[in-house]
């Protein structure tokens, strides 16, 4: 089975949104998706690109995607790649497509002199955890993810003013 991986283009934004929604539905988080096509067009393909997307295609049909961006490790003194979303449609799972997408991202990371490739996985998603560990991924049990969003983000930001 041949899987091809290509860089997404702005014309793929409706497809990217569809995949994001399918992933969120699987993760029981569809109610949190507020992204829309114009937002994706701006943030992925506008003047300041915040992330990159690759599309996985099987027999010419899109079957999944990966959305990633650079982060930075002060300990390594090098950039890393952070995988925000990896998704393969349910009927296409078990064919090695997820592994191929991760291998592609690992190759991108090495090509860009990144020191690591990392991502989060939901605690309840044992199939994903098992899959990632089978590829050599190590869970980071000593770290807790923190997030500030919505009103809390606005309140925190109000304590500092950025001058133009």
Image: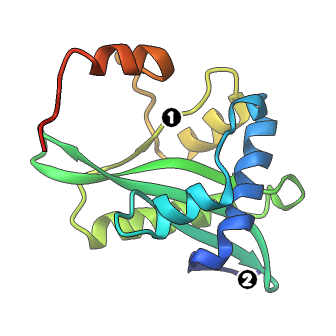
Residue at 69 percent of width and 38 percent of height: 33
The reply to whether residue 87 is in sight is yes
Residue under the point 64% across and 71% down: 55
From what the image shows, is residue 58 above or below residue 37? below
Residue 2's spot in the image, x, y percent? 73, 82
Instruction: Give the color scheme: rainbow, by chain, secondary structure or one colour.
Output: rainbow
- Disc number for residue 54: none
User: Relative to residue 106, is residue 86 drawn left or right?
Assistant: right
Residue on which the image places disc 1 = 120
Earlier in the chain: of badge 2 and badge 1, it is 2
Q: Residues within 10 Å of mark 1 (few under 14, many from 20)?
A: few
- Do labels 2 and 1 touch, CB within 8 Å? no
Q: Is residue 4 left or right of residue 164?
A: right
- Expressed as whole percent of the image width and height from the top left, the position of residue 38 reads 61, 61
What SS does tag 2 mark? loop
Residue under the image location 47 percent in, 45 percent down: 136
The CA distance from mark 2 to mark 1 is 28 Å
Please name whichever residue, 35 or 99, is drawn nearer the observer in this view of the structure.
35
**Residue that carries the numbered disc 2 in the rendered image:** 2
**Quadrant housing the N terminus:** bottom right
Where 33 falls versus 5 (above or below)? above
* Residue 135 visible, this angle: no
Percent position of residue 124, x then y = 69, 21
Residue 65 picture location, percent across and down: 64, 62
* Residue shown at 53% from the left, 57% from the top: 67
User: In the picture shown, does residue 92 fall above or below 158?
Assistant: below
The quadrant holding residue 107 is bottom left
Figure label count: 2
Say above or below: 46 vs 32: below
């Amino acid at each position: 089975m041949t899987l091809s991986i290509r860089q997404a283009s702005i014309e793929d934004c409706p497809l990217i949104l569809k995949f994001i929604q399918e992933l969120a539905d699987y993760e029981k988080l569809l109610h949190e998706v507020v992204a829309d096509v114009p937002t994706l067009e701006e943030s992925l393909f506008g003047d300041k690109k915040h992330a990159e997307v690759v599309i996985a295609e099987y027999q010419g049909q899109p079957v999944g995607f990966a959305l990633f961006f650079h982060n930075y490790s002060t300990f390594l003194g090098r950039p890393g790649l952070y995988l925000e979303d990896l998704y393969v449609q349910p009927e296409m799972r078990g064919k090695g497509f997820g592994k191929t997408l991760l291998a592609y991202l690992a190759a991108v990371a090495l090509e860009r002199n990144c020191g690591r490739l990392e991502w989060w996985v939901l605690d309840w998603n044992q199939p994903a955890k098992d899959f990632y560990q089978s590829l050599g991924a190590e869970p980071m049990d000593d770290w807790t993810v923190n997030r500030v969003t919505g009103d809390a983000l606005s309140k925190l930001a109000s304590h500092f003013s950025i001058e133009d």
